[in-house]
Amino acid sequence: MAGFLFSLTDLAAACGNGLHTLYVAPLKALCVDMARNLGAVVDETGIAARVETRTGDTPQARRRRQRSDPPDILLTTPESVALLISWPEAGSIFGNLRVVVVDEIHELAGTKRGDQLALALTRLSALSPGHRRIGLSATVAEPVKLASYLDDGAGVMVVRADGGASPDITIMETGNRIPLAGHTARHAVPDIYRAIRDVGTALVFVNTRSQAERVFQDLWEINDDNLGIALHHGSLAREQRLKVESAMAEGSLRAVVATSTLDLGVDWGAVDLVVQIGAPKGVARMLQRIGRARHRMDEPSKALLVPANRFELLECQAVLDAIGEGVLDGAPRERGGIDVLAQHVLATAASGPFHPDTLYRDVIRAAPYESLERSLFDRIVDYVATGGYALVAYERFRRLTACDDGTLRIADEATARRFRMNAGTIVEDAKLKVRMKSGKVIGEVEEHFMLGLSPGETFAFAGEVWALIGIRQTDAIVTRARGGEPRVPIYGGGSFPPTTNVAGFLRKIMAEPDRRAVLPEDVREWLDFQAEFSVLPGVDDLLVETFPRADKVFLVAYPFEGRPAHQTLGMLMTRRMERMGAGPLGFVANDYALAIWSLRHVGDISALIDESLLLEDLDDWLAGSSLLKRSFRKVATVAGLIERQHPGYRKTGRQVTFSTDLIYDVLHRHEPDHVLLEAARKEAMDTLLETRRLEDMLVRVRGRILQRDLDTVSPLALPVMLEVGRQMVASSALDDLIEAFGGEP
Amino acid sequence: MIVNGVVLQPDPAGVLHWAEARLLAVADLHLGKGKAFARHGSLLPPHDTKATIRHLAEVVTRLEPECVVCLGDSFHDREAASELEQASLTALEDLVRGRDWIWIAGNHDPVPPAMLSGRSMETFTIGRLTFRHVPSCAMVAGEVSGHLHPSAVIAPKGTRIRRRCFASDGRRVILPAFGAYAGGLDVHERAFSGLFPAGFDVWLVGGKEMRRIPGDRLVRPAWIERDR
């Protein structure tokens, strides 16, 4: 509420002069919540200000009215702001804007949605110069750096609120030994249940939606006291989520098992305890979640961490150490997305003619684009106008036309309309509605999971077990199932690598015996045994162990840089091992380690792992990989090359699938320098491959590789070895697979 | 592959080769599709026409057929045929000239392209085979057609692989689409129902060599209703 003090004072004096304050938050729920709180204040104080929300759920008629007659305070999301500035009436909507409040700013900065908002803010500056911007964030390591995200050239003042009492966080002790691998935390479920029973209200956070489903099932299995335990995640139907949220607000629930959908500062009354199952992955994330359990500033938040395996326990301890020493996570990605900028160019054009010089000057005032070169900007504008192809094939079909005064204007109203239908920076996998025979919708689940199920097979969803009857159009028709072990939905995304900050503390725990003193006995013994059997690496060392097993040589490295970076490393190392004649057969990566198995020993590991890994093979490999196709699909959608598949739309009858892979193949072969391919490469490297993180690691471990050639698997290698066997299949092996599949010649 | 007693060679490039007759059949080139999309506001890369012609030229050079049958939908729409770039037109005419080149009419291109050589016809019969665009509902032994863009999914070792394919029951064969921007339609879709009453085999395109895979070993995508 603090962010509105200025606005409310101002509005008390005079309101009804158009949009005064724009509030932007990353979640719809935050807007709704804030609208409720603001509404109460406005009612109490008698300020005549109109407070409204605008999200994807806002009815068409009200949205139209908001454009012609905006409220005093509008609460909305980055997507809605980006759409609002694309209307010709943007000038009149935002002309009298005085304040912009960006809530949970750390959630947006460094993401594509943040890029989108940063660009939209430059537009607001142009439409209403001199308005005030306020950013709100609970957990920031580098407030000044984050503040630059809001800086409009006028400078930013960073205000720190007193943090209040320090949080009371402990790692849950269970009578059971902590498993070596796995993510279910089944060993701790009875203890979690008791913890819930002993307090008034608890929030149980998990990292993925499938974990949420499983933990929820497990808790209900032992819920002898019939405690009100509910489930909340992003795939559930909206009505279902709202029901849980209001039950929580009324205080009629004892616990909610939730994913990040409940992360942000929505306030649903008294929460006595936060339970985090699985490693929290980052300090900011952890503090955010813990912050939910506090009634008053002077009362400490209470939180329980429940690691599901031993490395997660080390990671939990690393987060506690980092919080204890006051070291927060670093600032996120800095360079804004090319695809998002393409969208912004079209949005600007849709609201009226613009001059490229002016737009470029505005765009580079947005922090994510401050180092954007004019030549790249011009290529993006050219892409928006004509597709940006070397041969001038589409002059007749231009989306932007040039005027004599050097401005560009949108070709026609149809182009603007199509843009508004396709705008947005989130590209999701196709989803199917999970629907009962009666017609009731229970939620949505990724199409590829459902396609892996046969009719009659069961799965857990929304806290119940269902059997698939069949798939009709965009619906998966299901019926309640009884008994049997359900298959759990495997949702895309949702799991993050530990932040570099947390990874650093994790390495410290390995390196410094004092830090290990607080660990549970079985985990301490495990690490002591490792020290005796092999070695525990120093803070900046990279430990690499090799050992023979089943006619193969295994190599296990422990960079602690997260699964994406490890997968990239595994891919690059196996390519080099191939050239060295070691005969690599496969690899597996988790957040902590990488295991590669091969026919022969590579000899000196330092010849295998160095900085040149990233130079030699990456581009070559990337060009043929399906990763690049995946990121191209996203980039091409956000940049408006292809149209979004709208929910509810499904190809029916005799329609053919025309995939972006075909477009990618043609573009890659005939115009490899196209700006969208560049964008896809950049995105694949930054977000999917984490090459920057890998590069930092390779620099750090230069000359510090500890090689241990062992007779058998070490204690530290056991967890990743348990995952071996779930190996990935490289795309180049597809032809061999088809042959192995046994078709006759 | 044997169709109506004739030995045919499905080629990994996606064309059907009848070596004995020195004949090559190719389906659904969809030349000019990128430009057709651009006309409607999606500025897709304009190189698809060039890519398709180049790919076809490679195959023709390799197999040296005397007769080439294009099974219809060679051009994505009427404008595409009349607006072909000069370079593409020249490249195409270079292929057509000196061969018996047959343009079968398709639903996208019912009118044969005027400026190109070659013969235009609705159907073409030679020996025991009949070439046409749309597979007929009535069973015609020896029918070679396109139009449906068949594709299939297999699931070796827990992965999923989707490829364009030939589909045949020994009496008729349906060719995969050849065009760079021509997509695929799963062989389990309704459009194929009734065409192969006694089952069929597929040959997946794009690998190193062609292998026959029985239809019952394919993955049936779950969105296709079973209860029809």
Image (cartoon, coloured by chain):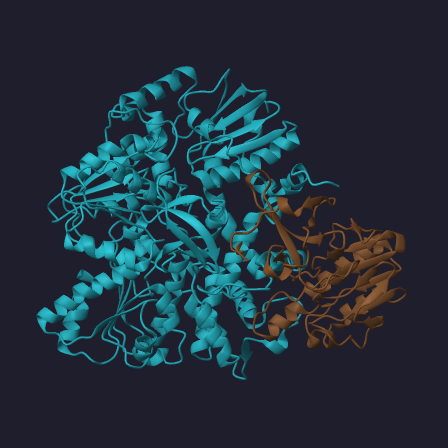
User: Which chain does brown denote in the image?
Assistant: B
Residue at the spot 74% in from the left edge and 45% down from the top edge? B210
Residue placed most toward the observer, B158 or A700:
B158
Query: What residue sits 40% from the left and 80% below the top?
Result: A88
Q: Name the tint of chain A in the rendering.
A: cyan
Give the x, y percent position of residue A304: 22, 37
Left or right, A360 with respect to A246, comes to right
Residue A10: x %, y % from top left: 16, 73
Compared across the picture, whether A433 is left or right of A103 comes to right
* Image point (41%, 21%), residue name: A715
Residue A121 can be seen in this image: no
Is A421 in front, or is A438? A438
Residue A51 drawn at (x, y percent): 21, 72
**Compared to B93, does A541 lie above or below?**
above
Is the C terminus of chain B in the top left, top right, bottom left or bottom right quadrant? bottom right
Frontmost residue, B154 versus A383: B154
User: Looking at the picture, how far across and down is residue B42, in whole percent?
Assistant: 57, 70
Q: Please, is residue A518 above or below residue A302 in the view?
A: above
Residue A350 visible to an observer of this rendering: yes
Q: How many marks?
A: 0
